[in-house]
Amino acid sequence: MAYIVTLPARQMRKIHDRLRLQLRLTKVLAAQDQPVGPNIGPPIALVISEDTDSSVERRSRRLIWMGSVSRHNTPGTVDKSVTIDPLRECMEDVPIDGEDGLLTLLDADLRNEFEQASLIGTAKWCSSEVWQALEAGLRTRFPQLVPLIDWLLAQASPPVLDSHDEADRAWQEQQDAVRSILRIADFPLPSLNAWKRPTSRDAPYTAGVIPQPSENSLIEHDVRAAGRAFGLDSDWMNGSGARCDINVLWDSSGRRRLEVTNVNALPLEHRTGTDMIYYHVPTESFTLVQYKRLDPRRREIRVDEQLRSQLDRLEKVAQLNSPPAQPHEWRLGGDPCFLKLAYWPEDTSKNPVEGLAHGMYLPVSYVRVLLENDCTLGPQRGSQARLLGYDRVDRHLVGAQFVELVKEGLVGTVGTTREQLWSMVKRRVSEGQNVLVAEENSSESVRDRQKRNRTRSSKDNSYTHKVYRQESLFGPDSEQ
């Protein structure tokens, strides 16, 4: 289906600069215009500018922006609103009316439906049949828009990850790590949200990330061209056989830079789990999250020897911590490492995960206390088996709480150098972990960072994106 927003050209010119910064638009959708019945297809949005000085008989409209509807809100008791996010400017002049206009591609019934949905000053919707005809015409007549259409469709209708498939399960965890990093670093979710399934099941999740199509979004298909992208030469960037993908984001001011590296060093069947590592360069602080999957029905996990040994290794990682010497180095505790006990629906086709996966965040020291308490004992009397899960743990952090603590610098290590960080990352990779590590660098002061994190006003969502990718994976004959 497609939502149509038609605005007078004069109004469009007034809000054009704001749209370029915010890259989103919210419009009221009257009760009588709300979709009904099974609306098949991705919720694409078309924003049209109409020259109101033209005659009624010869309307003059142009497609200026395209996007996808991310959510519906309820501003009143009857009316609703739709938020178009992401929203991107068309890179070609696309007329709606006239001999070369898109309407010439529609038959009489579809054209009538489009006209009813494109009344000036309104937000309405039309069927998937109308959108399919328009999409075919846009791809044929305006080839420069094809990458934008593909990017928006990937945002609006991403591939469904199957919780029963081993590769998809790994990608679910890495996808959640990517979304967590974007929230922590305060970059817009659409920047790394467009995704297609990689050809290789061994590939990292970010191998499937589609960068937004613009002159500032570039792909380099040799990861070694990144040079010292993270300040260090890494083994996997120099032909070790590991698969490494780097996505680099800059905010519009150029003051903040986020580098996200996704590394897989072993084939899928030999990996032991997923790590998310966030490193804030100005404060020399990192936070690590190791993912553990809960049974989606019982929502618990059995504590085995492998998990206990992983806890031992995480405690060694925590030894990179130093005592705080400055006010901004103070933390709520000495735990930089967490477990995320997460679960995904068994049938993700009916219950897709759009935000962060449900789960509990547990500091490692807290896990140790839990494992010494009767609350985690198994159901059989005298059994030494331990269980972790929702029925066993009364207190835990949820995603929003964890993200805020990291953003505010209230958890994480103190005084950890890049050399220490990357030595630890390489060790985690060699141990069989999928690793997604993000490094945020910024010229912000501590006060500026706090102010940005706490502002509730409209933010500048524009950014620049560059991608570095390896073509080979676990051997010279492998393909992306």
Image (cartoon, rainbow, N blue to C red):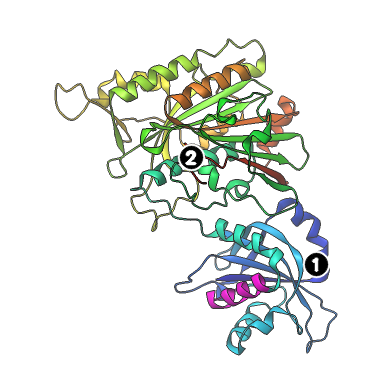
- Amino acid bearing label 2: Gln
Which residue is depicted at the point 55% across and 65% down?
A: 43
The foreground one among 353 and 30 is: 353
x and y, in percent, of residue 274 in the image: 44, 33
Q: Magenta stretch containing residue 438, yes or no?
A: no
Q: Main secondary structure of the magenta part?
A: helix
x and y, in percent, of residue 250 in the image: 71, 39
| Mark 2 residue element | helix
Which residue is depicted at the point 44% across and 40% down?
A: 173
Residue at the extreme left of the image, as rendered: 381
Disc number for residue 430: none
Which residue is depicted at the point 54% across and 48% down?
A: 208
Q: Examine the image and state in which quarter residue 395 appears.
A: top left
Which residue is depicted at the point 35% across and 54% down?
A: 347
Q: Quick check: marks 2 and 1 in contact, CB under 8 Å? A: no
**In front of the other: label 2 or label 1?**
2
- Amino acid bearing label 1: Gln
Is residue 110 something that shows in the picture?
yes
Instruction: Name which of mark 2 and mark 1 comes first in the sequence.
Output: 1
Looking at the rendering, the stretch of residues picked out in magenta corresponds to 125-140
x and y, in percent, of residue 45 in the image: 63, 66
| Mark 1 residue element | helix
What's the CA distance linking mark 2 and mark 1? 42 Å
Q: Residues within 10 Å of mark 1 (few under 14, many from 20)?
A: few
Residue that carries the numbered disc 2 in the rendered image: 174
Using the image, determine if residue 71 lies above or below residue 268.
below
Using the image, determine if residue 333 lies above or below residue 19.
above
Q: Is residue 400 left or right of residue 28?
A: left
Residue that carries the numbered disc 1 in the rendered image: 11
Q: Examine the image and state in which quarter residue 223 appears.
A: top right
Is residue 461 something that shows in the picture?
no
The foreground one among 478 and 404 is: 478
